[in-house]
C-alpha cells in the first residue's frame, strides 16, 4: 500500500525533530577563582589546568599549569607548566597574562518535549558584534524562567552537528520560529526577553523589580565602538575561513562583543512593568501604572496624530505608536 506523500513528509519531519542533539556547554575558567587544595610547608598549590602562559617578553608556554601561592595569601607566587616535553617553573614577575582553556561538557539533548519552544526549531542569533547566524534554536527552560524571560538557549548553527549553550546576555537577540511565526527575544541583563511588539518602539515585560541601571544588550550593540565591532566581525569571519569550529567561533565572537560594547546609562525600575525601547533614540522607558499617562504622552509627542492611551491595552498602544511615529 502506498503512503500518501503528505503523510510521509509529516512522519519524516517528526522523526527528524525527535532526533537527539549533541549539546556542548563551554564554561570559561578564571584562574583568580581556582582552589588551592594542596599544602606543602608554607606553600599552597592548585590542581593542574590546561592553558597558556604569556610571558613579559611576548613568548608563550602552553601546557598543564599548576599555580602556587603562599599560605593564607591571594597573590600568585609562581606557576609550573608541564608542556609534555618539559616542566617549566615561571615566577609571577615573568608573567604577562594567563588564559586557561574552558571546561567543555557534552551531552545528548532529548529534543522531543511537548512544549515546542524547548525543541530545536528554525531560527537565528545576532551577536553583539552585529553578525547574524542562521541555524536552529531551543529554549533551555527551567522553573525560574517566565513565559517572557529565559536565561539560556541552545543554538545549532547551519553546517554543525553540535549545538552550543549560549547563556543569557551574550546575544543581542535571537529568533525562534514556532508554528510559522518568528518570535524575537532581546538580550536583557542576564537573560533573554520576549519582544511582544516590534517596530520603532519595541515592547517587552520587565522581569526584574527594584533593579538599577539595567539595559538591553541590543542597546549596547546600538552604539558599540565601530572599530572594535568591525575587528570582532573580521575575527569571526577569519576563524570560519580557517576552518575553526563554528560553535567555538560563535562563542568567541559573543564574548568579544560583550567586551567591546558600550554600557549605557540605565533606568531605575521600581516595579514589575513594561519596557519600551525606542530604536531611533536608543532609550528605554519603563511604564508602570503610576507613570503611564505622563510617559505615554511623552512617547507620543512629535507623532503625526495622538494615540489612544490605555494601560489595559498596552500592545495596541505601542502598535499604534509604530503606525503614527515614523
Image: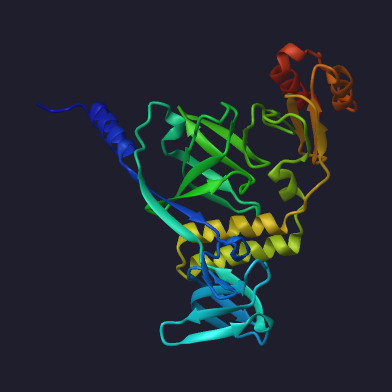
Looking at the image, which is closer to me, 72 or 26?
72
The quadrant in which the C terminus is found is top right
Q: Quadrant of residue 234?
A: bottom right
Residue 237 vertical position relative to residue 82 in the rendered view, above or below: above
The foreground one among 65 and 291 is: 65
Residue extending farthest front: 41
Question: Residue at (52%, 55%) from the top-left corner?
Answer: 27
* Numbered disc total: 0
Q: Position of residue 259 (x, y in %)?
A: 69, 58
Q: Is residue 75 visible?
A: yes
**Image quarter for residue 61?**
bottom right
Residue 326, visible in the rendered structure? no
104 or 79: nearer the eye?
Answer: 79
Q: Is residue 290 left or right of residue 240?
A: right
State which quadrant residue 238 falls in. bottom right
Image: 272 above or below 264: above
Residue 46 percent across, percent down from the top left:
52, 68
Q: Is residue 18 left or right of residue 153?
A: left
Q: Position of residue 99 (x, y in %)?
A: 58, 70
Image quadrant for the N terminus?
Answer: top left
Which coloring applies here? rainbow
Front one among 83 and 246: 83
Q: Position of residue 302 (x, y in %)?
A: 90, 28
Q: Is residue 25 above or below residue 181?
A: below
Q: Which residue is drawn at the image coordinates 81% and 14% (left, top)? A: 309
* Residue shown at 74% from the left, 64% from the top: 227
> In the image, is 319 to the left or to the right of 283?
left
Amino acid at each position: 500500500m502506498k503512503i500518501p506523500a503528505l503523510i510521509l513528509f509529516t512522519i519524516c519531519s517528526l522523526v527528524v525533530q525527535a532526533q537527539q542533539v549533541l549539546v556542548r556547554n563551554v564554561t570559561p575558567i578564571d584562574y583568580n577563582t581556582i582552589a588551592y587544595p594542596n599544602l606543602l610547608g608554607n606553600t599552597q598549590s592548585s590542581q593542574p589546568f590546561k592553558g597558556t602562559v604569556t610571558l613579559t617578553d611576548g613568548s608563550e608556554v602552553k601546557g598543564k599549569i599548576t599555580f602556587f601561592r603562599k599560605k593564607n595569601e591571594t597573590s600568585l607566587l609562581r606557576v609550573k607548566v608541564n608542556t609534555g616535553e618539559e616542566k617549566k617553573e615561571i615566577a609571577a614577575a615573568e608573567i604577562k597574562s594567563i588564559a586557561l582553556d574552558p571546561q567543555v561538557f557534552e551531552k545528548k539533548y532529548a529534543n522531543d518535549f511537548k512544549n515546542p519552544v524547548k525543541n530545536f526549531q528554525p531560527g537565528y542569533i545576532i551577536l553583539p558584534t552585529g553578525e547574524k547566524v542562521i541555524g536552529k534554536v531551543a529554549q533551555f527552560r527551567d522553573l525560574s524562567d517566565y513565559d517572557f524571560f529565559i536565561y539560556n538557549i541552545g543554538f545549532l548553527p547551519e553546517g554543525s552537528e553540535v549545538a552550543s549553550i549560549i547563556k543569557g546576555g551574550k546575544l543581542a537577540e535571537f529568533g525562534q520560529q514556532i508554528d510559522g511565526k518568528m518570535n524575537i527575544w532581546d538580550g536583557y541583563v542576564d537573560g533573554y526577553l520576549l519582544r511582544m511588539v516590534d517596530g520603532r518602539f519595541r515592547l517587552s515585560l520587565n522581569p526584574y523589580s527594584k533593579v538599577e541601571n539595567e539595559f538591553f544588550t541590543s542597546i549596547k550593540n546600538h552604539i558599540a565602538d565601530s572599530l572594535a565591532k568591525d575587528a570582532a566581525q573580521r575575527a569571526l569571519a577569519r576563524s570560519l575561513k580557517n576552518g575553526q569550529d563554528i560553535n567555538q567561533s560563535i562563542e568567541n565572537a559573543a564574548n568579544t562583543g560583550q567586551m567591546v560594547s558600550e554600557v549605557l546609562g540605565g533606568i531605575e525600575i521600581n516595579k514589575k512593568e513594561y519596557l519600551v525601547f525606542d530604536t531611533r533614540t536608543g532609550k528605554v522607558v519603563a511604564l508602570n501604572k503610576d507613570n503611564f499617562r505622563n510617559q505615554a504622552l511623552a512617547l507620543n509627542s512629535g507623532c503625526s496624530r495622538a494615540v489612544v492611551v490605555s494601560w489595559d491595552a498596552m500592545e495596541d498602544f505601542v502598535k499604534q505608536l509604530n503606525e503614527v511615529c515614523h
